[in-house]
Image (tube, rainbow, N blue to C red):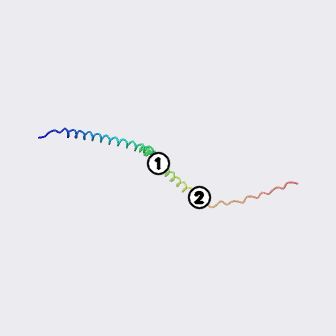
């Protein structure tokens, strides 16, 4: 034979409400923690993922341009060195000594 015990029913109901309240407190604590974490991150002045990716793309483009410029400079320096070597191999033109100018004497 089974009888209903009002004490056990009330206790079960109390525990159900306590679990609901505990879950509510847990959710509230999670929201507070999340808000504090977001405030902390905002105070640190961190960038977002989209801003980071945009800057990363700009940096990669700048690196590519710098490497292209370095290659162009190296090619130009090589050309200049070739021209200097070519000029050094040619014999210097024979220069005629310049005629000496004589100073005119002024009549006294």
Quadrant of the drawing holding the N terminus = top left
Q: Position of residue 9 (x, y in %)?
A: 20, 39
Label 1's element? helix
Q: Residue at x 17, y 39 (%)?
A: 5
Quick check: 20 left or right of 85? left
Quadrant of the drawing holding the C terminus = bottom right
Q: Sort mark 1 into few (<14), some (14-19) or many (20+) by Cα contacts within 10 Å.
A: few
Viewer-closest of 72 and 7 = 7
Residue topped by disc 1: 59
Residue topped by disc 2: 84
Q: Position of residue 83 (x, y in %)?
A: 57, 57
Q: Position of residue 26 (x, y in %)?
A: 32, 42
Q: Sort mark 2 into few (<14), some (14-19) or many (20+) by Cα contacts within 10 Å.
A: few
Quick check: 34 left or right of 108? left
Specify the farthest residue to the left.
1
- Above-or-below relation of 56 to 94: above
């Amino acid at each position: 034979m089974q009888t209903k015990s009002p004490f056990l029913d009330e206790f079960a109901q109390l525990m159900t409400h306590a679990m609901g309240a505990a879950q509510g407190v847990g959710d509230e604590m999670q929201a507070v923690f999340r808000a504090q974490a977001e405030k902390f991150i905002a105070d640190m002045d961190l960038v977002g993922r989209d801003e980071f990716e945009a800057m990363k793309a700009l940096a990669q483009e700048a690196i590519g341009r710098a490497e292209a410029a370095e290659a162009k400079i190296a090619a130009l320096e090589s050309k200049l060195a070739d021209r200097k070597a070519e000029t050094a191999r040619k014999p210097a033109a024979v220069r005629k000594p310049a005629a000496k100018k004589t100073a005119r004497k002024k009549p006294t």
